[in-house]
């Protein structure tokens, strides 16, 4: 059986490494990008099973990218988990309304992170 | 102006007298007086011709000569220096009439007084009038002496002519002194002249612009301060409407119509010149069917009146300054809140790597490592967690200070929230070897409050108490009803707080004691508790005895069943 693919959209290198190492250790394949636009292209090309989306991206907000993903009939079925360092009240609602299936706040707890990922990848 | 007349209901309006009716046809009171004189004297001449036929030649001629200046003054509205010309005509006519009727001894010699009378009608040229009368009398005497005058009128005709002359003079004088409508403003008695001058000044300096208008907005007259209304040049050329912004002309037109229908109306409009501003217009229907209007700047509008403008400008400047101060303060608060929010985000990003990697290591997720290193990883992770708490506290405090922290009220059993907070603190209490006791009521304690804030209050208070309580001590958390309030109490057997420190506590970044006694923390814990209590309309009080312990009491008016309990 082919390994499940996770697309990580994250602009901080250390966090990218953390997420990659965690997912890699669980046997998932990862695709990585730090740019929203490229995330869309990678999603079309590789059809990942899950997308981890940083909301605070340098060019385009992760919420905007999520909107595009959800408007695309070919991609809208891919679950998007927002990972964000914004923990203001109302952020979670805003992120869920933006089309994200789940929300993990930074700094992550490793167990919560893995539980959430497993929930979508089985 | 004509308020008293125009405000009368139509049925009660007095019928104008003959002179007044005449005045309606004459353009000015002075012309009306002249018209009355001309008509009366010409009528007398006609009577003489009818009664005495051909024998009335001299009498009728004299009367017609006397009527002539009245006719001229009726047609010609003499003003300024021109009035002296009209007075000269009166003098010549008086001499002609007197001489024709028989000179200084003749029946119309009295008409040498006519120029004096006319000078009254011409706006109080009394001195000039007296001179004219004197000149006329001199001329008559001179004519008699030179014997150039025709033979005197004699007999019945002379007597009648004399009477006619006297009656005309008396009636003319009465017309001046009675101040009949229309003559009033030009009927100065010697002592009335200054009052009239005052009236003129008042008219020109009314603190409004007063207009006489027709239904179509054309203007017959304008008085008062034109800078308060529409420029007189505009009014004179085309009337009120061209002075009104096109969008508002319909409203003004409708208002003029309403005034004629109902007797009065008022509206606010924007004037088109000399610059756009808002004017208030009040209209009243006058007895003659025209409209009296008063225009003034609408309130709270910059005005051309210097004093008003100065006042308005000053008020605006003060308001602007106050607004600027407030804006600056708000901008500063917003900037600080934004800075703290951004900083919080920037701090969380590296914290994610610190806590994430240390979490992997302390749980030995990828395989075993020496226990000592695992302990270090645990310490790194805990420090990261503490740093995160501080970041969250700073963020909360900044939101409270920026008044952007809004409570999410919900109804819940307070015991659940307190229980959740205490479970989080249990481990810390065990590590500190401090006993954590709780006193909770056996029945549900339903409150209407922000669950997260209440939990935070308990967490902060217990966390503080554990920090300042030495090994073997006790921290007691109690929750109870007290009247209409919920009371949360956290008491410890710790080091206590000195009275001088007690006052400072609860303010941001203040901690009690000397540097070595201070423990980790930014000193925000109590300020947050106090602020969150205040957001709920509650209070926080601190009691402490140095060396014996501290008790913090938070009272919150949040009991959901308070009404039922009281009932």
Image (cartoon, coloured by chain):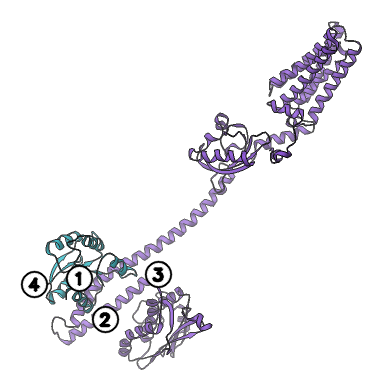
Colour purple maps to chain: B
Q: Are marks 4 and 1 on the same chain?
A: yes
The alpha-carbon separation of the residues under discs 4 and 2 comes to 38 Å
Which sits earlier in the primary sequence, circle 3 or circle 2? 2
Q: Closer to the camera: disc 1 or disc 3? A: 3
Residue at the disc numbered 3: B405
The alpha-carbon separation of the residues under discs 1 and 2 comes to 19 Å
Residue at the disc numbered 1: A15
Q: Where's the N terminus of chain B, which quadrant?
A: top right
Q: Closer to the camera: disc 3 or disc 2? A: 3
| Residue A48, disc | none
- SS of the residue under disc 2: helix
Q: Chain of mark 3?
A: B
Colour cyan maps to chain: A
Q: Are marks 3 and 4 on the same chain?
A: no
Q: Are marks 4 and 2 on the same chain?
A: no
What x and y, as percent, mark residue B263?
Answer: 64, 41
Q: Chain of mark 1?
A: A
Residue at the disc numbered 2: B382
Specify the quadrant of the image occupied by residue B505. bottom left
Viewer-proximal residue among A91 and B459 = A91
């Amino acid at each position: 059986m082919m390994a499940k693919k996770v697309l990580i959209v994250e602009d901080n290198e250390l966090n990218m490494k953390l997420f990659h190492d965690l997912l890699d250790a669980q046997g998932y394949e990862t695709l990585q990008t730090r740019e929203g636009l490229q995330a869309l292209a990678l999603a079309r090309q590789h059809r990942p099973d899950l997308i981890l989306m940083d909301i605070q991206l340098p060019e385009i907000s992760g919420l905007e990218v999520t909107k595009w993903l959800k408007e695309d009939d070919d991609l809208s079925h891919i679950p998007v988990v927002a990972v964000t360092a914004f923990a203001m009240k109302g952020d979670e609602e805003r992120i869920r309304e933006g089309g994200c299936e789940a929300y993990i706040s930074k700094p992550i707890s490793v167990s919560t992170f893995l539980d959430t990922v497993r929930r979508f990848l089985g | 102006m004509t308020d008293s007349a125009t405000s009368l209901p139509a049925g009660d309006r007095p019928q104008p007298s003959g002179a007044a009716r005449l005045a309606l046809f004459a353009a000015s009171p002075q012309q009306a007086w002249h018209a009355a004189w001309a008509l009366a004297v010409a009528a007398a001449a006609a009577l003489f011709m009818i009664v005495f036929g051909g024998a009335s030649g001299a009498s009728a001629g004299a009367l017609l000569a006397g009527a002539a200046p009245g006719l001229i003054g009726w047609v010609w509205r003499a003003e300024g220096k021109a009035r002296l010309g009209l007075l000269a005509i009166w003098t010549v006519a008086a001499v002609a009439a007197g001489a024709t009727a028989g000179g200084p001894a003749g029946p119309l010699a009295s008409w040498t007084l006519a120029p004096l009378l006319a000078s009254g009608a011409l706006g109080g040229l009394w001195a000039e009038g007296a001179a004219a009368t004197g000149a006329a009398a001199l001329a008559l005497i001179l004519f008699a002496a030179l014997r150039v005058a025709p033979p005197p009128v004699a007999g019945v005709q002379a007597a009648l002519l004399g009477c006619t002359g006297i009656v005309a003079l008396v009636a003319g004088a009465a017309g001046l002194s009675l101040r009949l409508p229309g003559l009033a403003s030009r009927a100065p008695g010697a002592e009335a002249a200054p009052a009239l001058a005052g009236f003129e000044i008042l008219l020109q300096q009314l603190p409004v612009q007063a207009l006489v208008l027709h239904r179509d907005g054309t203007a017959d007259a304008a008085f008062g301060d034109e800078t308060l209304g529409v420029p007189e040049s505009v009014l004179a050329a085309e009337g009120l409407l061209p002075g009104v912004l096109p969008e508002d002309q319909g409203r003004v037109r409708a208002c003029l119509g309403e005034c004629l229908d109902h007797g009065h109306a008022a509206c606010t409009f924007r004037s088109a010149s000399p610059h756009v501003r808002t004017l208030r217009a009040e209209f009243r229907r006058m007895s003659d069917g025209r409209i009296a209007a008063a225009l003034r700047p609408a309130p709270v509008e910059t005005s051309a009146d210097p004093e008003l403008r100065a006042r308005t400008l000053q008020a605006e400047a003060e308001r602007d300054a106050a607004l600027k101060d407030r804006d600056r303060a708000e901008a500063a608060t917003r900037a600080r809140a934004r800075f703290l929010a951004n900083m919080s985000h920037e701090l969380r990003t590296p914290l994610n790597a610190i806590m994430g990697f240390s979490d992997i290591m302390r749980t030995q997720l990828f395989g075993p490592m020496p226990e000592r290193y695992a302990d270090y990883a645990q310490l790194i992770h805990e420090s990261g967690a503490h740093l995160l708490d501080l970041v969250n506290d700073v963020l909360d405090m900044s939101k409270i200070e920026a008044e952007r922290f809004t409570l999410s009220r919900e109804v819940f059993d307070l015991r659940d929230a307190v229980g959740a907070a205490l479970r989080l603190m249990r481990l810390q209490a065990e590590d500190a070897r401090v006993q954590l006791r709780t006193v909770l009521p056996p029945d549900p304690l339903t409150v209407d409050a922000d669950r997260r804030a209440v939990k935070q209050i308990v967490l902060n208070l217990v966390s503080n108490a554990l920090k300042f309580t030495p090994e073997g001590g006790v921290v007691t958390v109690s929750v109870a009803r007290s009247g209409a309030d919920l009371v949360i109490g956290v008491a410890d057997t710790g080091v206590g707080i000195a009275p001088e420190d007690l006052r400072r506590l609860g303010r941001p970044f203040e901690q009690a004691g000397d540097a070595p006694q201070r423990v980790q923390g930014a000193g925000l814990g109590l300020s947050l508790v106090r602020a969150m209590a205040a957001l709920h309309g509650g209070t926080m009080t601190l009691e402490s005895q140095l060396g014996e312990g501290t008790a913090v009491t938070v009272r919150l008016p949040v009991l959901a069943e308070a009404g039922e309990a009281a009932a």
